[in-house]
Amino acid sequence: MWQFFHKLGSPKWFYGIATRFMPWLLASGLLLLAGGLAWGLAFAPADYLQGNSYRIIFIHVPTAFLAQSMYIMMAVAAVVTLVWRMKLADVFVKAVAPVGLVFTFLSLFTGAVWGKPTWGTWWVWDARLTSMLILLFLYGGVIALDRAINDEKSAARAVAVLVLVGVVNIPIIKYSVNWWNTLHQPATFKLTEKPSMPVEMWVPLLLSVLGLYLLFGWLACLRMKTEILVREQKTRWVKDLVMAGRG
Amino acid sequence: MAFDSFSAFIAMEGHGPYVWSCYAVFFILVAGMMIWSARRNRAVIEGCKRRFDQQQGTSGRDARPKASATFTRVEVSQD
């Protein structure tokens, strides 16, 4: 177990594994996402209340879902950074934060565009929307803080602390629709119950969530590889790798 | 198929602009991020390669000429 843990912390080992998995992640992610979105756009039935505007759900829910679970992953990595000083955990946080920013923005944007025909307004200071906006700022803060500190180790520690402080926002996002009964509808998927929508709607939604997850996996691997190369560019193994043309 | 015709699919009963603008922004941002990340990865690899090539070119013979002693005695008056 501990040997595995140490191996996992080795950038070189990760680089090899990531290179091997990336084509599969990309292919399966694109396939699932394309399938889910095409199904959701053209074949799923219209919602009896919202008509066709609900088709935005097939990108709104996956991006929002990813934005939150990415933050939780970053928080786990932050703990690893602080406790075990594992380099790879910090590389993960740094590589993934911009992706989180884009996904949070996308979920806010699609939510606003969906809100216009459904609620009659682009934006309300609803609890769910506000807490998602805070998540956007947290991602921005993580990126800015990392750029502001030149020393790699201090940057890693400062960013990890910020990420951990921000974790308090995640349960607020999750339960905001239950605690404050405002405009945003409650969760579509719950682990304990059957989905509150028909099969023809939730299967494509599940496909696009899974597809986006896999694409995120590909993006994370690629961006982590880039970051590892930048950090380890003076080492022997990077030299061998680059000169052999197996970057 | 949930729609009778292609134009109905585009129009989405009046919700077309909302739905399609969301999908357009989604595709632009996700594809853009993927392409940008891949290009940056390439650029970093190319940069490493160039540096290693340079190093290889200069290894063996030291490119910098041996610096001759540059210490010079400076007379400073002591009073």
Image (cartoon, coloured by chain):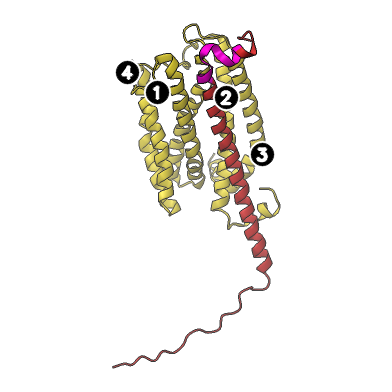
Chain colours: A yellow, B red
Whichever of callouts 4 and 2 sits on the residue coming sooner in the sequence is 4
From this viewpoint, is residue A222 visible? no
Residue A174 tag number? 1
The magenta stretch spans which residues? B8-19
Q: In which quarter of the image is residue A135?
A: top left
The local crowd at label 2, few if under 14, some if 14 to 19, many if 20 or more residues have their Cα within 10 Å, is some
Residue A210 tag number? 2
Q: Three-letter amino acid code at disc 2?
A: Leu
Question: What is the C-alpha distance between the residues marked 4 and 2?
Answer: 29 Å
Residue A12 tag number? none
Mark 4 lies on a secondary structure that is loop
Whichever of callouts 3 and 2 sits on the residue coming sooner in the sequence is 3
Whichever of callouts 1 and 3 sits on the residue coming sooner in the sequence is 3
* Residue to which mark 4 is pinned: A180
* Residue A54 magenta-highlighted: no
What chain letter is assigned to the residue under label 2?
A
* Residue to which mark 3 is pinned: A20
